[in-house]
Amino acid sequence: MKLKTNIPLQSQQHNQIDYNSKIMLLGSCFSENIGSKFKYYKFQNTVNPFGILFHPLAIENLIARAINKDFYSEGELIQHNEVWSCFDTHSRLDTISKGDLLKSLNDQIELTHQHLNASSHIIITLGTAWVYRHIATDKLVANCHKVPQKQFLKELLSVEQIAESLEAIVSLVKSINPKVNFIFTVSPVRHLKDGFVENNRSKAHLLSAIHHIVEPRKQLYYFPSYEIVMDELRDYRFYSTDMIHPNDLAIDYIWEKFNTVWLTEEAIKVSEKVGSIQAKKAHRPFNPNSEAHQKFLAKLELEIEDLQAKFPDILF
């Protein structure tokens, strides 16, 4: 008896990820979930240097600024409730010091420029097509930073606007890094504060726009994380208690699916060794001074040294 539908996935024949790959993940909080997996298994990766970005125009804006080294000035910062913020970035960067925020933003522009130049794979996860326009400046923002809602207009990006933004992102990055691979995906996190119908309209626009530009011959790929959750994991047991975000079990499942498509066979084997070492490092002995535990630590250190001799970028 078949109790679920499986999305057919085929392993990539070219441009797969291994332990020499340099991966950059941008976009919604789902990027952070997958980025944490890359981090745990010790891949070379960078995740959301400007914090979580939900819509494509926010990602495009910061990529453009990073590539052009268009550094921020004090006039682009805002203060609300004694906290300094920037409408272009996530609240994760907020500080109580204007100078600290300005330095942080411009340090991230410099670092992002370097990562965009060096990345072999850029994974972009789009969360929503709904955006907010700051009325006073007529500018679309990445984050409203709890500024009163009356200062913004809510808009739904069209499929054409999203596709144009994604094409601009690809063009910008390939102007400095022509060999980079893009992997696009849509976040399975439902934005139900927008409304159930509105969330589905938003996801439909994102999916349609991505498939306007996906072309494997141009190293532009799509990974169906959204469809895996919606069609394979059609059950609330795969959601966290808010019934909106996928839980750890769902993230593990998507990670396994991603591995079968995007990781080389060798990378999968190495990640299994890394996972084994990570589990051993997390072990808490009853008696840390016992002879048995000291032998355990010595053997573990040899395992780490052997792995690092082959892959010097793996650091524990």
Image (cartoon, rainbow, N blue to C red):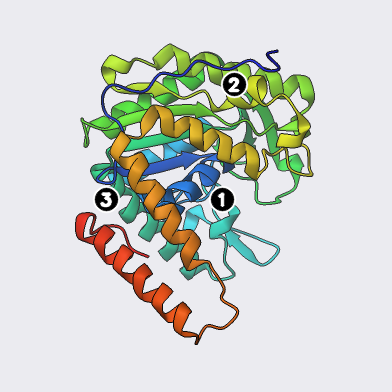
Q: Quick one: SS at disc 3?
A: helix
Across and down, in percent, residue 253 comes to 57, 35
Q: Quadrant of the N terminus?
A: top right
Q: Dot 3, crowdedness within 10 Å: few (<14), some or many (≥20)? A: few
Q: Specify the amino acid type for callout 3.
A: Gln
Q: Which residue is mark 3?
A: 114
Q: Residue at x 43, y 47 (%)?
A: 38
Q: Earlier in the sequence, mark 3 or mark 1?
A: 1
Q: Earlier in the sequence, mark 1 or mark 2?
A: 1
| Res. 202 mark | none
Q: CA distance from mark 2 to mark 3?
A: 33 Å
Q: Dot 2, crowdedness within 10 Å: few (<14), some or many (≥20)? A: some
Q: Is residue 138 among the parts visible in the rendering?
A: no
Across and down, in percent, residue 279 comes to 50, 60
Q: Quick one: SS at disc 1?
A: loop
Judge from the rendering whether residue 137 lies leftward or rightward of residue 215; answer left or right: right
Q: Quadrant of the C terminus?
A: bottom left
As rendered, which of 230 and 209 lies closer to the eye? 230
Q: Which residue is mark 2?
A: 227
